[in-house]
Amino acid sequence: MNLYLRLLLLRLNAERRGRLGVWDTSRTPFRVVPTDLDLLGHMNNGKYLTIMDVARMDLMIRSGFWKRLEDAGWYPVVAGQTIAYRKSLQPWQRFDVYTRILGFDERWGYLEQTFVVGSTVYAQAIVRSRFLKKSGGSVDHDELFALAGEHPAHLELPEWLDEWTANAVIPKEYVSARVE
């Protein structure tokens, strides 16, 4: 329920917060609420991922990209993510999530999402994603850039992402060997 309330508030406030370009960095404000807490009294690690979903929606909605995706019959999916936690978010604490597109390799798109209080980074995540067609199949990068606009030349992926991606994909033989 908390996710739906946050999504509703995001939609209602998106216009007031101003337009962005899809290649810009969005800043999405949040507050830790009681339903975000774990037994230790700080924000549950799973809630970070849920809030990241909302923050990505903020970038897509405010840039107008979400509407273009819907019109094209496409939708985004998360294929992998990694997150590092530096400090705990406490009850009622305000924080911002900064979301930006890092770039693309031959198959995936990558985003960076950073949880910040003031000027202090509390957590940072990298998200590997793709876009799929409701009619079936994946959206290739040429189609995506035709919809979003050519990706800026300054967007370069950190070298370590290649190794992370290679190690974060579950091999088919591993999955089938464990399911049978």
Image: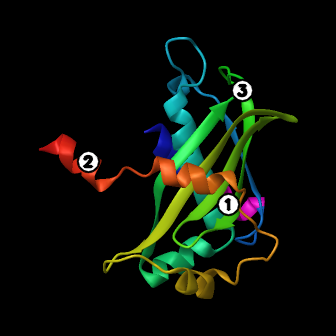
Amino acid found under the numbered disc labelled 2: Val
Image quarter of the N terminus = top left
Residue, disc 1 = 14
**Left or right: 73 in relation to 12:** left
Q: Which residue lies most toward the top here?
A: 40
- The answer for how far apart the CA atoms under marks 3 and 2 are is 32 Å
Residue, disc 2 = 175
Q: Residue at x 63, y 54 (%)?
A: 161
Amino acid found under the numbered disc labelled 1: Ala
Q: How is the image coloured?
A: rainbow
Q: Within 10 Å of the Cα at label 2, are there few (<14), some (14-19), or many (20+) other Cα atoms?
A: few
Closer to us: 95 or 175: 175
Please check the rendered image and state whether residue 121 is part of the magenta-colored stretch, yes or no: no
Amino acid found under the numbered disc labelled 3: Arg
Residue, disc 3 = 86
Q: Give x and y (percent) for residue 17.
A: 76, 59
The answer, for residue 9, to whether it is visible in the render is: no
The secondary structure type at the circle numbered 1 is helix
Q: Give the main secondary structure of the magenta stretch.
A: helix
Tally of marks: 3
Q: Quadrant of residue 36?
A: top right
Q: Give x and y (percent) for residue 171.
A: 34, 52
Q: Which residue lies most toward the left here?
A: 180
Q: Quadrant of residue 132?
A: bottom left
- The answer for how far apart the CA atoms under marks 3 and 1 are is 29 Å
Q: Quadrant of residue 33?
A: top right
Closer to us: 65 or 159: 159
**Left or right: 74 in relation to 67:** left
Image quarter of the C terminus = top left
Specify which label sits upstream in the sequence, 2 or 1. Answer: 1
Circle 2 or circle 1, nearest the eye: 2
Q: Residue at x 31, y 78 (%)?
A: 136
